[in-house]
Amino acid sequence: MTPARGRCAALLAACLLFTLATSSAEKRPITERDLFQFTWIADPQVSPDGTQVAFVRVVVNDKKDDYDTSIWTVSTRGGEPRMLTSGTRDTSPQWSPEGTRLAFARSVEKDGKHQPPQIYILPLTGGEAWQVTKLPKGASRPTWSPDGRTIAFNSATNADDLAKEACKGGKDKDKDGDKENGGDTDKGKCAKPEHESDVHVISRAIYRLNGAGYLDFTHRNHIWSVAVGGGVDERIKPKQLTSGEFSEQEITWAPDGSKIYFVSNRSLEPYYELPQNAVYEVPAGGGESKEVTRLEGGALSSISVSRDGKRMAFLGAPNQPVRSYTQEDLWVVDLAPGAKPRNLTANFDWDVGSAVFGDQGSPRASGGSRPLWSADGNSLVVLVGREGRGNLERFDVATGKNSVVTRGDQAVGSYVEKPDGTMLVVRVSTPTNIGDLFVVLPNGSLQRLTDINHKLFSQLNLTEPEEITYTSFDGKKIQAWAQKPPDFDPKKKYPLILNIHGGPHGAYGYIFEHEFQWMAAKGYVVLYPNPRGSTTYGQEFGNIIQYHYPGDDFKDLMAGVDELIRRGYIDEKRLGVTGGSGGGLLTDWVVGHTTRFAAAVAQRDIASWAAWWYSADFTLFQPNWFRKPPFEDPQDYVERSPITYINEVKTPLMLILGDADWRTPEGAGGEEMFRALKYRKVPTAMVRFPGESHELSRSGQPWHRIERLEHIVNWFEIYLQGKKIPGYVPGEEGAWK
């Protein structure tokens, strides 16, 4: 190299280093309020010709403290996404078979309230979307028939609703009141009742559901259809195809359009039995439903029919032996009388159909994915969770042999294909990206279609977590991650926050976690392990905590804290612990079994297993977690309840609770811990969120999600950083803002 070239090369290198340094310096730490600028992609669908992907774009509406959803599309060759619909509650996009129309569900606002969603059709050749249903209880999950002339959908509308709607329109009224023509009878039917009762008469053990509220057993979710072949000017009355005491889900057309398959549990009180359901079929024109197949001694979901209509795939798990955690398998059954399902993954000890979770899944319109048949029908693609990762794998239908479709430190969420099976599109999240769309190329690499948060994320100094594997007390290997501050210096000592996941059968992993990135940006090292009981590590590892929860998982968590302290950059006098749901239970357990933590925040917790058994929104009538109910074996519930060890708690504890959380009702958790600690004069505060369910951290109102983060870190700032933040002791209420 000549001296001149050497000087030029040195100059270019210096310029490059300067540019990189400047670029890094210009980036800022992520904040809790960046949530307002996040954009989420949900429910992607590939067009029949494979040229476009329609998806739901979800954004925060900060004026209404809610989320807006609209339908957008992006070319499979890349480029900027473009808006297809202008509604604020548009979801469930579905391409017509010929690709010239898009069906979707829309909820419009009336008198300040969003009405039940209805089905609309958007002509892609031009023009406005038109409404094709107008049912009192709405319509959801539109699904096109193979010939594009009919849309099947779900609705909870019943005969009484239709009669009331007819009365509103004056159709049942007879001005003359002529008895012979039904005048008086019609007037009676349309007479306004003296009093509309709001009293709930409860006769079932499961009568309300977290996030959904009280269950209405007079409104079952049935299958309807509506003819749509004639276009915007045609007004066809929807037809109800199924009826009865039971709801139907997962509408799936037979390829020849002659019938519709669906999944249903035909038990009035299913909690008296171990999980079970079946696949049924109903003629496309309506008629009697009949059973197609079932998984003997188990439950199934995610049904998918082969293109030739001869076979069906689904995910399912047997319920024997009774476990706390049971992996699902991939099954195939011939659609012929007497055929029995065949398990393709019986010897495959990874999580089929599920993977890892984070706090930035789409808060609305999430959609879902099913096993995908190959074009030739010889294989199936499905999501698999392995050691904190979520990727797609292919399974041979004849042998069950598997092969990798996608790979990497990532979490595949939705996965969909072109109708002929020749193109695969995935939504992928990583620790530094919320979730974007990619085409899967034949060699398994990903071709990016969207960069939906580029403008915001290009300004943020986000960092990858460090994967850590350590050995617990009994030799088990535990996988964990450490999210460090962006300017991390291994020579310094940092405060630590141990963050415990819920479930307990769930998994952290390679997925975006706003909470962890933000805590790290505030100067904390965040440790998030997958202790025993976590998924993505095999059947035995997940189920080992059955009848021993909490217990040895606590030891796994403490071993993780010890591992980071051993590395030299953690100040062991500034340790904090938090977790939600099952993680909230374990947080309560931690402070009752060690005093090493300077502060703790238990979120959506369980303090008394017995109180929870009696009040949660689902039952433990089966011996999955406890062998017997609390009135038959009270000591087991006492020994495994954190409230039992309340006299050992010296750690300042904050409780985060949702007022509408029926998954972990506050009376069985935070209320007990708070009152007991106040009696004992241990520093404690309870933060309650009006109207919020168990999903507060993932899909709660945007401002509530932000305030939740602020309260958690405020507590740690006080007790780990020595800061003065008012609002958490008597006499300073409300001052924290």
Image: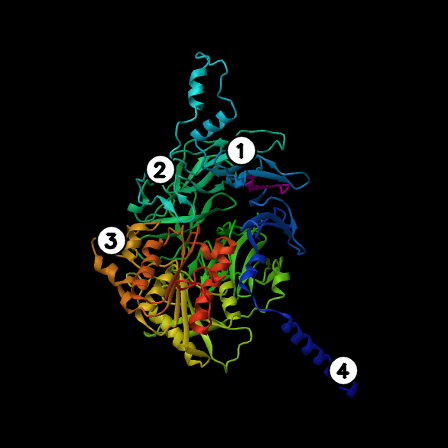
Measured in 3D between alpha carbons, the distance from the residue under mark 2 to the one under mark 4, in whole angstroms, is 82 Å
Residue ID for mark 2 = 199
Looking at the rendered structure, the secondary structure element under dot 2 is: loop
Q: Are marks 2 and 3 in contact (CB under 8 Å)?
A: no
The type of residue carrying mark 4 is Cys
CA separation, marks 1 and 3? 46 Å
Q: Which mark is residue 629?
A: 3
Task: Tell me the distance, in whole angstroms, between the alpha carbons under discs 1 and 4.
Answer: 71 Å
Circle 3: element type: loop
Q: Is residue 57 above or below residue 220?
A: below
In the current view of this chain or complex, which residue is farthest to the left?
632
- Classify 192 as above or below 362: above
The image quarter containing residue 450 is bottom right
Residue at the image position 55 percent from the left and 56 percent from the top: 426
Horizontal side, residue 236 vs residue 343: left or right: right
Residue 507 image position (x, y, % from top left): 43, 63
For marks 1 and 4 on the same chain, the one whose residue lies earlier in the sequence: 4
Q: Say whether residue 48 is left or right of residue 285.
A: right
Residue type indicated by callout 1: Lys
Distance in Å between CA atoms under marks 2 and 1:
28 Å
Quarter holding the N terminus is bottom right
From the viewer's perspective, is 19 left or right of 43? right
Range of magenta residues: 96-109
* CA–CA distance in space, label 2 to label 3: 29 Å
Tell me the residue that label 4 is attached to: 8
Q: Quadrant of residue 548?
A: bottom left
Which residue is labeled 1 in the image? 134
Disc 1: CA contacts within 10 A as few (<14), some (14-19) or many (>=20):
some
In this orientation, does residue 50 appear? no
Depth-wise, is mark 1 or mark 4 nearer the camera?
A: 1
Residue type highlighted by circle 2? Val
